[in-house]
Structure formats: structure tokens, C-alpha cells
Amino acid sequence: MLHEGEILTNNSALNKCAQCKDCKFNNDGSEMGSSYDSGSCIMYPYPAHKPLRVLRNDGFCDYRKEQK
């Protein structure tokens, strides 16, 4: 139910996991692969998930390694 004064946002427009875009570990390693902005990657395989600081672009990932 929508409450008076509530603001709705389009979460698909958020720029999640920006630092993961060029990371060597950005997909989950499965055959299907996942996009860099998903909650899982090689270093945080499902059902684990990336730390909130990474998901929200508030801090750096301990495992980030630039793709060459």
C-alpha cells in the first residue's frame, strides 16, 4: 500500500557495483554467468553476496582485481 508522501524509485536505474564492472572476478563463474551488478561473483558465490558497501558503491571490495 502506498502511503502519503512516499517516494517510489526505479531500482533498475541504480548504478550498483560500479567497481565490479572491470573486475577480474565480476561474474559468478557459472556457465550462465552473471552480470557485474548482481549480488554474487566468483569471490562471493551464491548464496553468499557481496558486502553492502560494494553493492551500494560506499566502499571498496577486498578482492577487486583489474581485468587485463
Image (tube, rainbow, N blue to C red):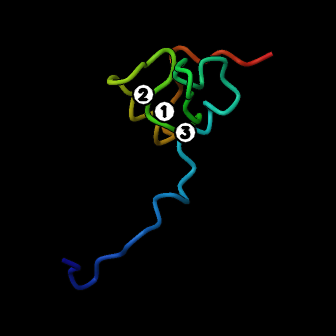
Q: Which comes before the other along the chain, label 2 or label 3?
A: 3
Residue at the outermost right position: 68
Residue 66 lies, in percent from the top left, at 72, 18
Q: In this picture, is 12 found above or below 38?
A: below
Q: Residue at x 37, y 23 (%)?
A: 46
Residue holding disc 2: 50
Amino acid beneath label 3:
Asp
Residue 4 lies, in percent from the top left, at 23, 85
The quarter of the displayed image where residue 3 is located: bottom left
Image quarter of the C terminus: top right
Residue contact at pointers 2 and 3, CB within 8 angstroms: no
Marks 1 and 2, how far apart in space? 6 Å
Marks 3 and 1, how far apart in space? 10 Å
Side of 50 relative to 17 (left or right): left
Amino acid beneath label 2:
Lys
Please tell me whether mark 1 sits on a helix, a strand or a loop: helix
Packing grade of label 2 (10 A; few <14, some 14-19, many >=20) is some
Residue 1 lies, in percent from the top left, at 18, 77
Q: Which comes before the other along the chain, label 3 or label 1?
A: 3
Q: In this picture, is 23 found above or below 16?
A: above
Residue holding disc 1: 54
Marks 2 and 3, how far apart in space? 10 Å
| Mark in the foreground, 1 or 2 | 2
Residue holding disc 3: 37
Question: Looking at the image, which is closer to me, 29 or 41?
Answer: 29
Please tell me whether mark 2 sits on a helix, a strand or a loop: loop
Q: Residue at x 66, y 33 (%)?
A: 21
